[in-house]
């Protein structure tokens, strides 16, 4: 689905993946498009576009990033998806990356180095 936005005599076009369209959850599983397999799509669905932009900014600025969720599966999926965002631009996260931090290691998050943890 291509959407058009008019901004001061200019047209901006963007593509909204089918998996982010309203009503996607109601679709039959036999008709799921290929972009469902992108690791970024679940992260985008969980945190939304505005927070995704802030996350990308934090990743590019090599900040300390903590992602929180009640679901361990969702948490590890989001941390890995955040890391894969950089890989889309041929960049690598060369700092600490822990999908799920055990409780006994939380005290170590006071380190000054950049990290991406859940």
Image (cartoon, helix red, strand yellow):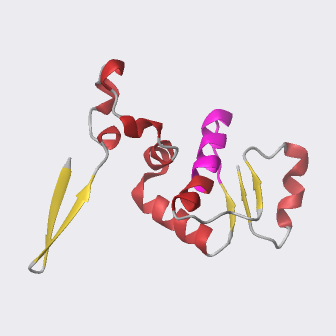
Residue at (80%, 47%) from the top-left corner? Answer: 101
* Snapshot quadrant of residue 45: top left
Residue at (68%, 71%) from the top-left corner? Answer: 63
For residue 42, side relative to residue 87 (left or right): left
Q: Eyeballing the image, is 11 above or below 31?
A: below
Q: Eyeballing the image, is 48 above or below 36?
A: below
Residue 74 spot, x, y in % from top left: 60, 37
Residue 3 spot, x, y in % from top left: 18, 55
* Snapshot quadrant of residue 93: bottom right
Predominant SS along the magenta part: helix
Magenta part of the chain: 67-82
Q: Nearer the viewer, residue 14 or 92?
A: 92
For residue 5, side relative to residue 35 (left or right): left
* Snapshot quadrant of residue 15: bottom left
Residue at (48%, 51%) from the top-left corner? Answer: 47
Point out the residue furthest to the bottom here: 8
Task: Please tell me how many numbered marks the rendered image carries.
Answer: 0
Residue 61 spot, x, y in % from top left: 62, 76
Point out the residue furthest to the front here: 90
For residue 21, side relative to residue 70 (left or right): left
Q: Nearer the viewer, residue 69 or 13?
A: 13
Residue at (91%, 46%) from the top-left corner? Answer: 104
Q: Eyeballing the image, is 81 above or below 50?
A: above
Residue 68 on the magenta span: yes
Residue 64 spot, x, y in % from top left: 71, 67
Residue 70 on the magenta span: yes
């Amino acid at each position: 689905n291509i959407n058009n936005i008019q901004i001061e005599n200019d047209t901006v076009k963007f593509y909204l993946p089918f998996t982010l369209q309203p009503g996607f959850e109601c679709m039959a599983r036999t008709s799921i498009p290929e972009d469902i397999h992108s690791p970024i799509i679940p992260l985008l669905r969980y945190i939304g576009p505005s927070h995704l932009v802030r996350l990308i900014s934090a990743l590019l600025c090599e900040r300390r990033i903590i992602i929180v969720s009640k679901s361990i599966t969702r948490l590890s999926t989001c941390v890995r998806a955040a890391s894969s965002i950089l890989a889309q631009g041929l960049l690598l996260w060369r700092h600490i990356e822990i999908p799920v931090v055990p409780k006994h290691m939380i005290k170590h998050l006071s380190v000054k180095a950049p990290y991406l943890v859940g």
